[in-house]
Image (tube, rainbow, N blue to C red):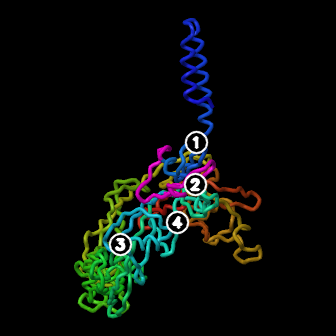
C-alpha cells in the first residue's frame, strides 16, 4: 500500500507538468484512489446477526459486538440482551444473537401488571412479580389453562426455533444457550383464585371451591343441575364473593292435562290453583280441576283440567203426510188431477246437554212440541165414463176403458201342471184353456169381462196367474198356434160397463212401461 504522504507528492508532481498533461495526471490519480479503496474494503470481516426472526449478514471494520450492532442500526431495549456480551471482540464468521425481552401481562387479585421478561416458564415469570398460587387456584396462558411449570419459550414459534443455539466466545470456544429467536408474541397470564362457597341445596349442605366469576358458572362447573322454577339466592349472574352462601330452593315437577295437551313444568307453589295460575290456565264457567283448585299439589304432580260446556240441542223428526183420493165426476176415467200438494209436519224435542272435554255426560229432555202439522196430499181421480167406438178387423166394437198393459202369452202346457193333473188346462172360471182366453189381475179387470187386444183379438177374462199382477195381461193360445208376446199394448175393456161399485177407479202404477 502506498503511504498517504507519497500519494500527495505524486499528485503534486503531476500538476507541475506542463499544462497539456494535467488531464492525464487526473485520470491516473483517480485510478490509484480506486485501487486504494478496494484494498481498504477487502480488510472487513463478516459476521451474522440474529435479531428475533431476522437474520442479517454484516461486513464491518468494527471490533466489538456493541460497535457492530450500532453500525447495523440495531437498538436494544432495557431488558434486551446479547450473546456474546456487548464488549466481546468480534472475529470473522462470528454469530451475534440479540435476545429480545418479551412483553408479558400478569392479571391477578384485581391487578394488571405489565413487564418485559426472559423467563422460560410460567413459574419463573410469576417469581419475577412475586406471585404464588394457593390450593385450587389455576392459571391460563393466553386463554388456555396450563400448569405452573408450563414453558413460555414455545409460544408463537416452532420447536426448531426453540432449540438451543451456539454462539462464539472470544477464546474461540462454543457457548451453549437457549436462544428465543422469532418468539416475540405477547404473553398474558391470568391467575384464577379459588374461593370457598357454602351451598344449601334444599337442606343439603356442602362446600365447594371455585375460580369462576358468577354464581351460575360456579354451580354449573360443580355439576349442580338446576331446573326451571328453582329459586337461587343470590341470583345466577351475581359475582362470586369469598365465603359466599348460596341457597337453592328446589321446585317440584308438575303436569297439567288440559285441552288435549300436556303442560310439563316445575313450581314453587303448593296448591293446584296456584300451579294453574302460574301456567296461565284458567277455569271458565263450569270448568273444574282434578284435584280441586284449593287442594294441595298431589305427590305425582299431575293435574287434570276438565272443560265443561252446557248446550241446548233441538232434534226434529218429520211427520209424513197422507195422500187423499177424491172422486171427480167431471174428470174422465183414468185421469188424475193434483188438488193439494202434500207437506210433511215437524215434531221437535229440546234437550239440555252437558259435555266434559267434548264427551256427552248428561242429556235431559226439556220440552217437546209439534212444530208443524202435516198437510195431506189431495188427488182427484176421474169417475166420468164415456163409451167409445173402436174399429177392428172383427168389426166395430164399443169400449168404456183403455188400459196400457204388458202383454205376455201362455198355453195349458206352460201353466206348471202336468197333462195327467186333474186341473190341467182348466182356467180360474173353470173353462177349458183355448185361444181367446186371457189372464189378468182381477182387481184391475174383473173376471168375466171381455177385452180387445190389437194383434190378438177379443179375449174373455177367465183366468188369473201368480205372476199376473197390476197392469199385466197374459194372452192364451192353443198348443198348436202359440205366439210369444212380450210387449206393451193398449187393452180395451168392452161394454157393458160394470156397476160403479165394482169399478176400480185408481189403477196400480206397476209394472211401468220403460
N-term mark: 3 or 2: 3
Do labels 1 and 4 touch, CB within 8 Å? Answer: no
N-term mark: 4 or 3: 3
| Residue 16 image point, x, y percent | 54, 12
Q: Quadrant of residue 385?
A: bottom left
N-term mark: 1 or 4: 1
454 or 245, which is in the foreground? 245
Q: Secondary structure at mark 2?
A: strand
| Residue 9 image point, x, y percent | 55, 22
Pointer 4: residues within 10 angstroms few (<14), some, or many (20+)?
Answer: some
N-term mark: 1 or 3: 1
- Indicate yes or no whether the magenta region holds residue 73: yes
* Residue on which disc 4 sits: 446
Q: Is residue 497 visible?
A: yes
Q: Which residues are magenta?
A: 70-99
Mark-to-mark CA distance, 1 and 4 = 154 Å
N-term mark: 4 or 2: 4
Look at discs 4 and 3 and give the one toward the viewer. Answer: 3
* Residue on which disc 1 sits: 59
Q: Secondary structure at mark 3?
A: strand
Mark-to-mark CA distance, 2 and 1 = 153 Å
Look at discs 1 and 4 and give the one toward the viewer. Answer: 1
Q: Quadrant of residue 217?
A: bottom left
Pointer 1: residues within 10 angstroms few (<14), some, or many (20+)?
Answer: some
| Residue 496 image point, x, y percent | 49, 59
Mark-to-mark CA distance, 4 and 3 = 130 Å
Look at discs 3 and 2 and give the one toward the viewer. Answer: 3
Mark-to-mark CA distance, 4 and 2 = 14 Å
* Residue on which disc 2 sits: 452
Amino acid at each position: 500500500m502506498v503511504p498517504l504522504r507519497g500519494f500527495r507528492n505524486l499528485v503534486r508532481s503531476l500538476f507541475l507538468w506542463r499544462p497539456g498533461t494535467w488531464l492525464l495526471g487526473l485520470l491516473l490519480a483517480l485510478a490509484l484512489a480506486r485501487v486504494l479503496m478496494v484494498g481498504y474494503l477487502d480488510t472487513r470481516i463478516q459476521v451474522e446477526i440474529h435479531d428475533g426472526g431476522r437474520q442479517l449478514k454484516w461486513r464491518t471494520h468494527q471490533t466489538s459486538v456493541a460497535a457492530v450492532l450500532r453500525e447495523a442500526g440495531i437498538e436494544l431495549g432495557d431488558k434486551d440482551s446479547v450473546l456474546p456480551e456487548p464488549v466481546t471482540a468480534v472475529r470473522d464468521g462470528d454469530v451475534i444473537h440479540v435476545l429480545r425481552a418479551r412483553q408479558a401481562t400478569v392479571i391477578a387479585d384485581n391487578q394488571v401488571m405489565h413487564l418485559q421478561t426472559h423467563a422460560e416458564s410460567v413459574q419463573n415469570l410469576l417469581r419475577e412479580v412475586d406471585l404464588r398460587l394457593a390450593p385450587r387456584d389455576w392459571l391460563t396462558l393466553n386463554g388456555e389453562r396450563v400448569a405452573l411449570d408450563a414453558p413460555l419459550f414455545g409460544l408463537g414459534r416452532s420447536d426448531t426455533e426453540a432449540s438451543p443455539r451456539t454462539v462464539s466466545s472470544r477464546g474461540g470456544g462454543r457457548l451453549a444457550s437457549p436462544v428465543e429467536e422469532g418468539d416475540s408474541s405477547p404473553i398474558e397470564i391470568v391467575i384464577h383464585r379459588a374461593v370457598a362457597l357454602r351451598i344449601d341445596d334444599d337442606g343439603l349442605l356442602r362446600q365447594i371451591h371455585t375460580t369462576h366469576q358468577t354464581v351460575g358458572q360456579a354451580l354449573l362447573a360443580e355439576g349442580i343441575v338446576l331446573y326451571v322454577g328453582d329459586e337461587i339466592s343470590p341470583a345466577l349472574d351475581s359475582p362470586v364473593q369469598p365465603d359466599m352462601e348460596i341457597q337453592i330452593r328446589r321446585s317440584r315437577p308438575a303436569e297439567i292435562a288440559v285441552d288435549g295437551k300436556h303442560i310439563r313444568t316445575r313450581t314453587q307453589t303448593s296448591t293446584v290453583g296456584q300451579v294453574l295460575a302460574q301456567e296461565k290456565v284458567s277455569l271458565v264457567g263450569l270448568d273444574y280441576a282434578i284435584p280441586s283448585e284449593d287442594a294441595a299439589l298431589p305427590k305425582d304432580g299431575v293435574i287434570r283440567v276438565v272443560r265443561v260446556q252446557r248446550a241446548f240441542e233441538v232434534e226434529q223428526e218429520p211427520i209424513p203426510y197422507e195422500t187423499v183420493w177424491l172422486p171427480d165426476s167431471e174428470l174422465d176415467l183414468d185421469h188424475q188431477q193434483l188438488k193439494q200438494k202434500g207437506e210433511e209436519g215437524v215434531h221437535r224435542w229440546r234437550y239440555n246437554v252437558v259435555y266434559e272435554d267434548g264427551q256427552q255426560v248428561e242429556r235431559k229432555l226439556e220440552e217437546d212440541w209439534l212444530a208443524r202439522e202435516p198437510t195431506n196430499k189431495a188427488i182427484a181421480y176421474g169417475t166420468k165414463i164415456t163409451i167409445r167406438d173402436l174399429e177392428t178387423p172383427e168389426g166395430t166394437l164399443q169400449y168404456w176403458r183403455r188400459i196400457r198393459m204388458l202383454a205376455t202369452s201362455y198355453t195349458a202346457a206352460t201353466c206348471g201342471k202336468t197333462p195327467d193333473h186333474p186341473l190341467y188346462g182348466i182356467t180360474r172360471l173353470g173353462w177349458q184353456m183355448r185361444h181367446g182366453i186371457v189372464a189378468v189381475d182381477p182387481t184391475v179387470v174383473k173376471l168375466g169381462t171381455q177385452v180387445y187386444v190389437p194383434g190378438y183379438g177379443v179375449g174373455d177374462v177367465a183366468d188369473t196367474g201368480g205372476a199376473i199382477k197390476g197392469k199385466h195381461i197374459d194372452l192364451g193360445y192353443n198348443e198348436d198356434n202359440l205366439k210369444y208376446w212380450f210387449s206393451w199394448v193398449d187393452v180395451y175393456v168392452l161394454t157393458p160397463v160394470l156397476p160403479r161399485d165394482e169399478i176400480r177407479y185408481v189403477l196400480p202404477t206397476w209394472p211401468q212401461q220403460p
